[in-house]
Amino acid sequence: MSDLPLSGVRVLELGNYIAAPTAGRLLADFGADVVKVERPRTGDELRNWRLYAGDTSMLYRTLNRNKRSITLDMRSDAGREAVLDLTRRSDVVLENFRPGTLEKWGLGPGELDAANPDVVLVRISAFGQTGPLSARPGFAAVAEAMGGLRALVGEEDRPPSRTGVSIGDSIAGLYGAFSAVMGLFQRESSTDRPPLDRRSMDIALNEAVFSVMESLVPDHLAYGVERRRVGGRMEGIAPSNAYECGDGGSVVIAGNGDSIYGRFMQVIGRPELGTEPDLASNAGRWQRRDELDAAIEAWTRSLPRDEVLALLEEAGVPAGPIHAAADIVADEQLRARNMVQYFDVDAGGTEPTRVGFPGVVPVLDGTSVPIRHVGPDLGADTADVLGGLLGYPDDRIRAAAGEES
């Protein structure tokens, strides 16, 4: 689609795993031509993560949709020259190698800037490009722990848990895409060419996680508060939790708004709890959270899930079902906004499988932007990019891609 917001922008993605590919996916979703560079033969390691059959995981297909895949041996002279040639024709270079890796290969910021003095460089790493931990490797699990998130996830009487997805990588990826667009806006709106240090965006996984920890540190420094794990609740906010229903389903109910709380207690048949003065605000309700949760779950367990949700909706109490994958696929709201998009994909069987993939966010014109294609096969676009875009002959393509002669 030529009318998408980032049409005409080219991004060179030198990234593996989740963080940088997430940033690249967001840019590709809205029209950028994202050329993903992968190592010869094995490619991005994400191709094998949660691989149940076939040779490319659905995780890779999801995070690398709308991109082109090429293989380059960046450790070789031919591969290095190809990266610099692609940089000359790109607006953004996106990478998430361990700090110092690109420099070791002769592809550091100085070389990229010499190749293209207008390029925006987005760098994602565990702890950033500077500081005493900058050279240390780390995945999202470590970043989530050191950024403050892990200490708040799970039950109070059990060891810290983690969310079911690599949320630290995804948050860093969001910052990566934002940084790229910010750099492009700066470049286009400046009368003078911004210097390299203003076009280099430095994103650390632990800092990305820390940035969404709300008032964790200010509350500690201002009041001496040490937040702790509280399971499905949110500290200081009540009642807000997950509750089981009579038919085995579960719901999340957020009845913690002061104006909502009274209506909520009416619905569950406990109006006296809605009028007690010490329960008029979250502070008081938090002190009696166990009592309130017991009263609420006694009500939810007496009814099937759909009836619980219908009664809460009628009363204007925020609530929703806890969805698994099958529920998401059937969700009429998501369907109306094209938020599950289907493609025939090789899933290891004798015939392609019809698979639904998450739609594009944010929505434009009322429905999700159509996904152009899911993550490509390894090196599917090498000849097209190196031959068509750079004009390389076949022997030079093979040398850059690390192929046997």
Image (cartoon, helix red, strand yellow):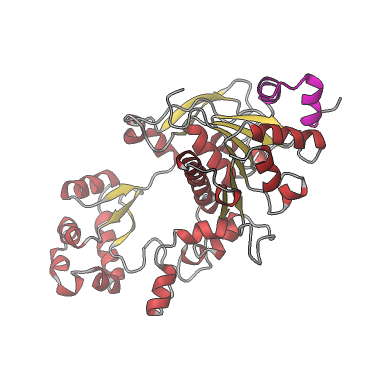
Q: Nearer the viewer, residue 371 or 261?
A: 371
Asked whether, in this view, residue 327 is left or right of residue 38, the answer is left
Q: Position of residue 342 (x, y in %)?
A: 47, 26
**Residue at horizontal 31 percent and vertical 47 percent from the top:** 320
Where's the C terminus, which quadrant?
A: top right
Q: Nearer the viewer, residue 118 or 164?
A: 118
Q: Residue furthest bottom?
A: 224
Q: Residue furthest right?
A: 405
Picture quadrant where residue 140 is located: bottom right
Asked whether, in this view, residue 3 is left or right of residue 144, the answer is left
Indicate whether residue 397 is drawn in magenta: yes
Q: From this viewpoint, is residue 272 visible?
A: yes
Indicate whether residue 290 is drawn in magenta: no
Which secondary structure dominates the residues rendered in magenta? helix
Q: Is residue 203 above or below residue 346?
A: below
Asked whether, in this view, residue 302 is left or right of residue 383, the answer is left
Picture quadrant where residue 24 is located: top right
Label count reads 0
**Residue at horizontal 59 percent and vertical 40 percent from the top:** 119
Q: Nearer the viewer, residue 2 or 230?
A: 2
Q: Position of residue 123 (x, y in %)?
A: 60, 49
The part of the chain drawn in magenta is 381-402
Q: Position of residue 394 (x, y in %)?
A: 78, 20
Q: From this viewpoint, is residue 73 visible?
A: no
Q: Nearer the viewer, residue 39 or 351?
A: 39
Q: Is residue 149 above or below residue 71?
A: below
Asked whether, in this view, residue 44 is left or right of residue 219, the answer is right
Q: Position of residue 233 (x, y in %)?
A: 36, 63
